[in-house]
Structures are given as structure tokens and as C-alpha cells.
Image: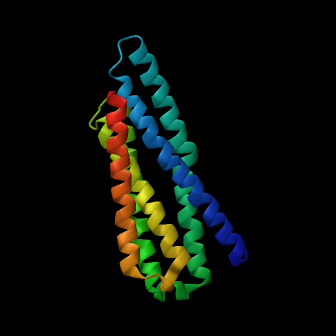
């Protein structure tokens, strides 16, 4: 398989992985908020969310993560000089953090399956934005590579983070009204 095909497959599975990560945390939020309802609504919703979370995780999100790593590794095998590029070291650091994020989400999934609600919905909303920050960082790193001004990149990254936090606070206020 040529490099362009491997790269295209890598991008497809990255998109699928992020879609799964974004949606799974939304389901966690809805699942957690369903606990505030009375029965039988709470029981019915909880069982439905457990089913949806499990299917999303094991049929889409985790296979997409595995295939992302496989095709990303394959690209490095095809062009080993990538490992000498400073931008790749930064990207791989974010990918490592994203893998940790993935497995923290898996732990939340396992907890919710056992009816252990260790996170509040607002905490999950903030957690959901961690994946957004990783996506923004990785896309800019890969797109700009060595031409990126790291000071501007860092300021931009924190500006996005602050914007997301302000959006969460605004949403929380609007929900209370």
C-alpha cells in the first residue's frame, strides 16, 4: 500500500475515533443526568444508555483507535525520518495523552455499567472538551509542522481552552434559567 493510501486511512480512522470520543462523553452526560429522574424513567434510560455506550465503544470508538494507531505507525515505517522531526514528537505526545483520555473514558464506561456515577454532568462536559483541545492541537501541529510559531501556537491553544471553558459556564447558566 502506498503512503497516500495509508495516510488517507489514518485520517479516516482519526475522524472516526474522535467522533466516538465526542459522542461517548455526551452519552455519559445524558446517562448521568438520567439519574435525576424518577422510576421507571431512570431505569429505562439507564439501560438504554448502557446499551448505546457499549455499542459505540466496542464497535466504533475502540476499533477506530486501534486502526488509527496501526495506520499512523505504518506511515512512520514508510517514512522513518518523521521520527526526527520536532513537530512529530509534539504530535506523538498529544496522541499519547489522547490514548490516556481514551482509557479514562473506558473506565467511566465500566463504572456506569456498574451504576457507579463518580462524575457529575458538568465535570463530564469539561472532560469532553479535553478531546476538542487535543484535536485542535494535533491538527495545527500536523498542518503547520515546522513552520509553526510555537509562541502563537501556545497562545492559540490556551485561547481555545479559555473559550471552551467560558462556553461551558455560559451553557450552565442558560440551563439553570
Q: How many badges with numbers are in the image?
A: 0
The quarter of the image holding the N terminus is: bottom right
**Looking at this rendering, what residue extends furthest in the left direction?**
118
Q: Which residue is found at the position 50% from the left and 71% from the top? A: 140
- Residue 29, located in which quarter of the rendered image? top left
Q: Looking at the picture, does residue 8 appear above or below residue 56?
A: below
Q: Looking at the picture, does residue 146 appear above or below residue 9?
A: below
Q: Which residue is found at the position 60% from the left and 58% from the top? A: 13
Nearer to us in this view, 165 or 109: 165
Q: Which residue is found at the position 42% from the left and 14% from the top? A: 41
The quarter of the image holding the C terminus is: top left
Tell me: 133 left or right of 1: left
Q: Looking at the picture, does residue 12 appear above or below residue 148?
A: above
Tell me: 149 left or right of 10: left
Q: Where is residue 133 in the image (x, y as percent from the top left)?
A: 41, 60
Q: Where is residue 156 in the image (x, y as percent from the top left)?
A: 40, 69
**Looking at this rendering, what residue extends furthest in the top direction?**
40
Tell me: 175 left or right of 91: left
Q: Looking at the picture, does residue 115 appear above or below residue 58?
A: above
Q: Which residue is found at the position 48% from the left and 86% from the top? A: 85
**How are the residues colored?**
rainbow
Q: Position of residue 142 (x, y in %)?
A: 53, 75
Instruction: Report if residue 107 is visible in the image.
Output: no
Instruction: Report if residue 20 is visible in the image.
Output: yes
Tell me: 123 left or right of 77: left
Q: Position of residue 79 (x, y in %)?
A: 59, 84
Amino acid at each position: 500500500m502506498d503512503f497516500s493510501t495509508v495516510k488517507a486511512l489514518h485520517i479516516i480512522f482519526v475522524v472516526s475515533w474522535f467522533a466516538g470520543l465526542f459522542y461517548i462523553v455526551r452519552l455519559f452526560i445524558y446517562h448521568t443526568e438520567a439519574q435525576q429522574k424518577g422510576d421507571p424513567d431512570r431505569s429505562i434510560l439507564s439501560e438504554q444508555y448502557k446499551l448505546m455506550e457499549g455499542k459505540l465503544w466496542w464497535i466504533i470508538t475502540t476499533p477506530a483507535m486501534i486502526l488509527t494507531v496501526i495506520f499512523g505507525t505504518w506511515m512512520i515505517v514508510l517514512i522513518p525520518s518523521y521520527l526526527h522531526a520536532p513537530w512529530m514528537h509534539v504530535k506523538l505526545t498529544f496522541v499519547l495523552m489522547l490514548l490516556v483520555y481514551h482509557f479514562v473514558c473506558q473506565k467511566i464506561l465500566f463504572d456506569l455499567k456498574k451504576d457507579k456515577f463518580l462524575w457529575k454532568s458538568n465535570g463530564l462536559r469539561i472532560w469532553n472538551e479535553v478531546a476538542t483541545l487535543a484535536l485542535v492541537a494535533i491538527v495545527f501541529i500536523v498542518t503547520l509542522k515546522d513552520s509553526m510559531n510555537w509562541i502563537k501556537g501556545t497562545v492559540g491553544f490556551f485561547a481555545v481552552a479559555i473559550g471552551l471553558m467560558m462556553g461551558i459556564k455560559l451553557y450552565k447558566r442558560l440551563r439553570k434559567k
